[in-house]
Amino acid sequence: MSGPPSDLAPDRGTPRVPRGAPSVGGYGGHVGAPSDLAPDRGAPRVPRGVPSVGGYGGHVGAPMKNWRLLVTEPCDGATNMAIDEALWRGRHAGTSPPTVRFFAWDPPTVSVGYGQPLDRHVDVAACRRLGVGLVRRPTGGSAIYHDGPERELTYCVTATADDLGVGGDLLETYRWIARALVRGLNALGARAEMIPTGRGLGPDPAFCFARTGAFEIEAGGRKLVGSAQRRLGTSFLQHGAVLLGVDATRLRALFPTTRDPLATLTTLETAIGRRPTFDEVTRALTDAFETEHGVTLVPGGLSADETARVETLVGERYGRATFLAAPARP
């Protein structure tokens, strides 16, 4: 479901937060530490030291028109998931604004759903051999291989149903986000579409892109974006992977029991005939959220409270081997 694609907004020089919380240490279960410097993708970066949140005005009421935009440097899996949860917990408490975040992974990482067993369906030995991290998400669903910024952009939305001006039903919030994603992807020429009823029945597959869920996004009949959501009251965290390209050999090695992980997925490279850059997709999706929903995304950073929460979550949850090894409870 999408209207005519909007024109891309001019490059506003979106700032980047350096690696979420640079003081955070440890990335449990990950193989290989992230590099000190992310590859230069041509957009300005905020100097080290996480900037404070600015420009959103401490909003109270619904729906919100001013949202925070975060574009963070590639982080290891534990830090990425801790940032997402910190944003969500802050929004639930009313101390953080509604936020759209775009980010990438360093090192490339397999994330598993919070209730998903870490078993033979994900080849842990192959992860070690290939230098691929492992992390358990705060959201449910199936495993995803998150490549670096050359092949994937990951989005995160943390808000309340009131921020969106919709009811509290999970599918309503999924649809609200999907409308913006479809608009942005189609501005790039993807001919993407939202699938209202999903495809396939039965238990969740081990690999997220093996099946399209309700209000997920396809292009050419194949899944282009894989998403998952977690809720607390009327607040929610939704994040998902937008595939720019794919490393087919690595994907097959990481998911050995998935018959053909490429059979049901597609990429922006396939959909539009070239691989767009991380920054290009960030600009298209930023413009789409603003145009589709009449909101303003104000570039910002993590607050001091959020940064402290990230550090705590890495140390007590996402960086711990015990959390990775055992399925979590809601």
Image (cartoon, rainbow, N blue to C red):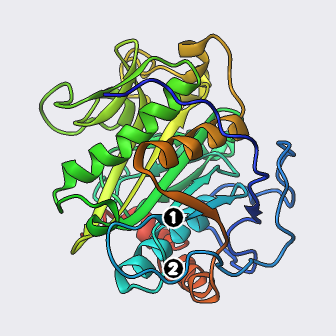
Identify the mark at residue 190; answer none if there is no mark: none
Q: State how far apart marks 1 and 2 are (Cα).
A: 9 Å
**Seen in the image, is 272 located left or right of residue 113?**
right
For the residues labelled 1 and 2, say whether their Cβ atoms are less than 8 Å apart: yes
The residue at which mark 1 appears reads as 81
Q: Position of residue 165 (x, y in %)?
A: 27, 61
Instruction: Classify residue 113 as left or right of residue 6.
Output: left
| Left or right, 94 with reference to 27 | left
- Position of the N terminus by quadrant: top left
What amino acid does circle 1 point to?
Met
Q: Position of residue 225 (x, y in %)?
A: 43, 34
Q: Residue at x 70, y 54 (%)?
A: 74
Query: Looking at the image, which is closer to me, 174 or 147?
Result: 174
- The residue located at (18%, 63%) in the rendering is 168
Residue under circle 2? Answer: 313
Mark 2 is surrounded, within 10 Å at the Cα level, by few (under 14), some (14 to 19) or many (20 or more) other residues, namely many
Q: Is residue 329 visible?
A: no
Q: Residue at x 76, y 58 (%)?
A: 34
The percent coordinates of residue 159 (x first, y second) are 38, 67
Q: Earlier in the sequence, mark 1 or mark 2?
A: 1
Residue 136, x across and y down, in percent:
44, 60
Q: Which type of secondary structure does the marked residue at label 2 adopt? A: helix
Left or right: residue 260 versus residue 197 is right
Q: Give the amino acid at mark 2.
A: Leu
Res. 218 in view: yes
Q: Residue at x 51, y 64 (%)?
A: 81
- Residue reaching furthest to the left: 202
- Under tag 1, what secondary structure? helix
Residue 269, image quadrant: top right
